[in-house]
Amino acid sequence: MCEAEEAAAAVTIGATVPTGFELTAAAEVEEKLGSRCSVRRDRGKIYFAVAAEALAQVHQLRSVDNLFVVVKEFTDYQFKETKEESLKDLEDLVKQLPWTDPLKVWKLNTNLKKKKTKRKKQNPQGSASKENLSDGEGEEKTDTKVADKESDDQAQNALGLESAGGQETQAIISVDNGKQSDAKDEFLATAGSENGAGNCKESENEAPVLKFRVTCNRAGDKHNFTSNDAARDFGGAVQEHFQWKADMTNFDVEVLLNIHNNEVVVGIALTEESLHRRNITHFGPTTLRSTLAYGMLRLCDAQPSDIIVDPMCGTGAIPIEGATEWPNCFHIAGDNNPQAMKRIASNICSLLKKNQNQESSTSWGVSLDTVQWDICSLPLRTGSVDVIVTDMPFGKRIGSKKKNWDLYPACLKEMSRICRPGTGRAVLLTQDKKCFAKALSGMGRLWRKSQTVWVNVGGLHAAVYLLKRTLEEVGENRSHW
Amino acid sequence: MKLLTHNLLTSHVRGLRPGGGYPLGIQVEVVEGILRCPDSGREFPITKGIPNMLLAEDET
C-alpha cells in the first residue's frame, strides 16, 4: 500500500469510557469524527472505524479514558472443555491473528506522540484541549509532575487511588470478573529466553528489540482459566511469534486480551496513561475523572451563553472541563472548603498558563470564576442560573451518610431557587441514591426527573440524575429582579 | 472575580428587605478587595480573586 492509501485506510479503534456513558461517548465520536460506533452497553467500551490519518483527532476525544487498536474481535469464541486446551487454543491463536496493520497503526501512534513532544512549543493549535495529550506525557515540567504521578499510581493500583474506577478495564492488573487481584501476574520474562538479537516482525531496521506486555481482562462464569493464565500463555506465544522481550514496566507494545463470556477482543494499546486526568494538576481526595465530568456536562445540553454552576466543586474537575469544552458558556465553581479553594485556584492557574503558551491566542482567558460559599445558602440571585452540574458528597470519603439526610434536601432546595424555572436543569452525581430519592420526593413541584445514568465511580455504584426545573417559581423571601 | 459573577452575587444576610442585598458594592485594592452589602453594610472579603461569601452562624 502506498503511503496515501495507508493513511486513508480504515482502522478499528476501541475506547474505554466511564461505564454508563457509552452512548454519550458514541455521540461525541459521531459528532467529531463522523464515525458510527458499536457500543458494548454497560461495559464501558465503544468501537468505531476511522482513517489512520485521523488518529490525532481520536486522541482529542473528551469522553474516552483509553484507546486501543483492534487486532481481531471474536463475537462467539468457543472455549474448549479443559483449562489446558483452552489455553493452548489461545496460544495457537497468536500466529493466526492479523497483526500487520494494527502494528502499523501502533507505530503511527508512537510517532504521533513523539511529534507532539517535539512540536509542543510551536504548536499553533488553538484550543486548549489539544494540549492535553502532551500534558499527559509529562512534558511541562512543573505543572504535570503531579498529574503524571497520580495517573501512574492510579494505573498501578486498581484498588482505588482517588477516584480510580474499580472496574476500569484499563487496569494493568489482570482482572477476573470484577474481583481484583493485586498480584501483577501478567506475562513476565520468566521464560528466561532473553533474545536480544531478534527483531520483531514489524520493525524495519531497528536494532533494539521491542518490549511488550500482555494485559488480560476476563469476565464470565464459564471460563475454566483465569486472566493470569491467559495473560501468561498468550504472552508466551506472542514472545515466541515476534521474538519481543517481555517487560512489565518499560514496554513499547501493550497487547490487550479482553474476554467477556464468549466475546474475545485482541488489541494493542494506543494510550499509556489514562487521558482522564488531563485537566487537573492538583488533586483532592475525591477528584472526579475528567471523562466523567465531560459526560455529565454533555447530558445537560449546554447552550451558548448558559450560566453553569457547580456549587460543590471540590478541586473543580467539572467547571474546568466545562470551561475548556464549552467556552461560550459561563462557568462558576463554588465550595465551602478552603482546601478545595486553594486547589481549584491552582488548577485554574495551570490552565491559564497552558492557554498562554499557545501562540495566536489574544483571548487566553477562561470562562470560569470561583466563589467560596455555603451550598445551603447560596449568595446567588433567584432564577439566575441555567444549569447546575455537580458531584454530590457520597458520604464515604467526604461527609457522612447521616449528614446527607440533612444536606441533600437543603441542597435541592437552594438549587431549585437559583435555577431558572422552565428552562433550567441539573445534572447530579451521587452514590447515596436512597437519600437522594427521598430528598427529591418532596420536591415534585419544582423538579422533574428526566433521565438516570448508572455509573461506576471508584468501584461504587452511583447514578447521574438529569433533572428539569419546572415552571413553578420559588416563594420569595430573598432578592429578585 | 469577573464582572458577570458580580452581577449574579447577592447578599444573603438575614433580615434584609425583599430585593435587598443587591448589588454588592465593590471596594478593590490591587488583588484583594471587598464586596459590601448595600443594605446591611456587611463586608465579604475577596482574596486572590475569590470572594468568600460564607456567613457566620449568627448571621444566617
Image (cartoon, coloured by chain):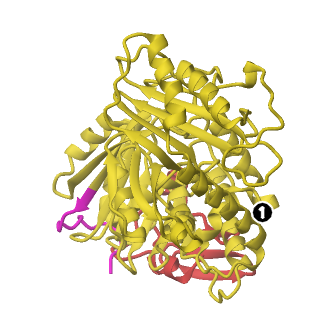
Chain colours: A yellow, B red
Which is the main secondary structure of the residues drawn in magenta?
loop
Residue with the most extreme front position: A1
Region of the chain picked out in magenta, as a range: A467-481
Q: Is residue A299 above or below residue A234?
A: below
Task: Report helix, strand or loop for mark 1.
Answer: loop
At a point 40% along the width and 61% down the height, the residue shown is: A297
Q: Determine which residue is flagged by label 1.
A: A140
**Is A444 positioned to the left or the right of A351 in the image?**
left
Residue A143 lies in quadrant:
bottom right
x then y, percent, for residue A101? 54, 54
Q: Amino acid at mark 1?
A: Glu
Quarter where residue A12 is shown: bottom left
Q: Is residue A368 left or right of residue A24?
A: right
Looking at the image, can residue A276 be seen? Answer: no
Rendered location of residue A56, percent (x, y): 57, 67
Task: Judge from the rendering whether residue A91 lies leftward or rightward of residue A363; answer left or right.
Answer: left
The 10 Å Cα crowd at callout 1, few under 14, some 14 to 19, many 20 or more, is some
Q: Residue at x 55, y 74 (%)?
A: A4
User: Closest to the observer: A108 or B50?
Assistant: A108
What subunit carries mark 1? A
Residue A301 spot, x, y in % from top left: 32, 68
Find out whether residue A431 is within the magenta segment: no
- Give the residue displayed 73% in from the left and 54% down from the top: A204
Magenta stretch containing residue A475, yes or no?
A: yes
Residue A460 position (above or below residue A223): below
- Quadrant that contains the N terminus of chain A: bottom right
Is residue A309 visible in the rendered structure shown here? yes
Compared across the picture, whether B34 is left or right of A140 comes to left
